[in-house]
Image: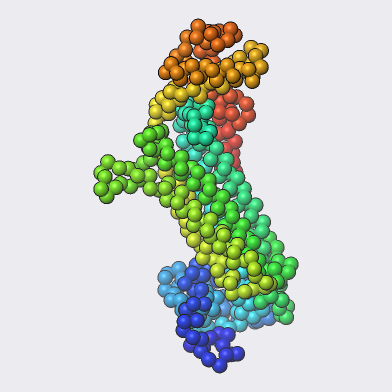
Amino acid sequence: MTKLWGGRFTKETDKLVEEYTASINFDKQLVYEDIEGSLAHVTMLADKEIISAEERDQIIRGLVTIREKVAAGKVDYSVANEDIHMNIERMLIDEIGPVGGKLHTGRSRNDQVATDFHLYVRKQTKIMIKHLENVQRAIISQAKDNMDTIMPGYTHLQRAQPILFAHHLLAYFWMFQRDKQRLEDSLKRVNWSPLGAGALAGTTFPINREQTAEMLQFDQVYPNSLDAVSDRDFAVEFLSVCSIIMTHLSRLSEELITWSSQEFQFIELDDAFCTGSSIMPQKKNPDVPELLRGKTGRIYGNLMSLLTVLKGLPLAYNKDMQEDKEGVFDTVATLDGALSLLAPMLKTMHVNKENMYQAVEQDYSNATDIADYLATKGLPFREAHEVIGKIVLYAIENKKYLLDLSLEEYKNFHHLFESDIYDVLAYKNVVNARNSIGGTGKEQVKNQLIHAEEFVNQ
């Protein structure tokens, strides 16, 4: 089969070279974007009288037919045609004859692939935003069900202060909200049109780049043709945001794994999201969050891979840039699966409220409130801190918790203690006392929920 670019060459491409350099095995994922860009391009060519209206109509009919065949699974791609662009063009020529060769007038595969890639990343960015919103809704649902569930809050993985479980969950809501904002903001840079930049220097044909940009719903055209065909910042930014999302997913997954262990027993994941052991029948393994945590490495790797590919490239297009897509495709598939699983897994998990509260009762996480108590009675906080440290040490040595100590025992450490110390130390009161903006007090968590629902319902 003669190459569509073969006029300059006197030999057939070596089969090994053909297989090694072909990208069709992965860039066929861009088939719909490629056809979309071609439909806009051919419409513009006719409007500028570069081709005739009759030729335009023939090409459009051919492209629509190919799109229908793709949707029906009736298309065979050829490595001999190298990439998605040449495959589509060959199919078009086979479908409508030599006039199909006019589709490529005024453009290069360099601006064509860049256009396809922009369209793909834009589409996937919007899908990712929807996935994140589904996860946020699942978090809100669990938070509403756990407005009175008290759990230990941790620093250094040591029990620190009691908090509402709803408050803990909503921390992830805001992480994912920032992720959404990053994705939304990235669209400003994704939504530039490279179409019409040609191979690197533009074209001699009187094309209208603004028209094709408008038809493809781009916000603007690249003002520099070299930049248009060589820029992959938008893909790097997409992978960067996905890496941050995956960091958040991994942190949440780690907590779900920990909480569902026999040592914690704070939650139980639904059977639909767990697996068993081939040898130990009693096991219920949190494989889904473990895989979410584990797949973080490949997302990071895809980002580093693209950065490394780009770091030494001169302008403009280089074959190295064929390596820009597989990592993005893999990241999309990985994160799409992760977010699709996370939302229902969160929504269906069972929260062991009693176990959480029992854990709070068996620690000293209300100690800070004693220091605050003494400070409100006039004792400098630093002195109060020292007093409480001694009280906690005394309680540990005597195998007691702070609510178990008698008033006499408290007075042995400082005369400012009165019977109201027990109200201060009650865990519900400890939680609700933190009523500053963003705190774990119930009223503040209610306010958080109001704001959270506003964000997902915009």
Which residue is at 62% across, 48% downward?
A: 181
Is residue 157 shown above or below 18?
A: above
Q: Is residue 349 left or right of residue 301?
A: left
Quadrant for the C terminus in the image: top right
The foreground one among 210 and 428 is: 428
Figure check: 392 above or below 168: above
Percent position of residue 82, x then y: 51, 78
x 25%, y 44%: residue: 281
373 shown above or below 157: above
Please say whether residue 365 is visible from this viewpoint.
yes
Please name the residue shown 53% across and 91% down the image: 11
Q: Which picture quadrant has residue 212?
A: bottom right
337 vs 32, nearest the viewer: 337
> Farthest bottom residue?
10
Q: Is residue 266 left or right of residue 154?
A: left
Tell me residue 161's x, y (percent): 52, 27
Residue 31 lies, in percent from the top left, at 51, 70
**Number of numbered discs present?**
0
Horizontally, is 110 left or right of 22 in the view? right
Quarter of image, res 34:
bottom right
The reply to whether residue 37 is in sight is no
Residue 249 in the image: x percent, y percent?
50, 46
Residue at the image point whose x is 60% and y is 76% from the top = 109
Q: How is the image coloured?
A: rainbow
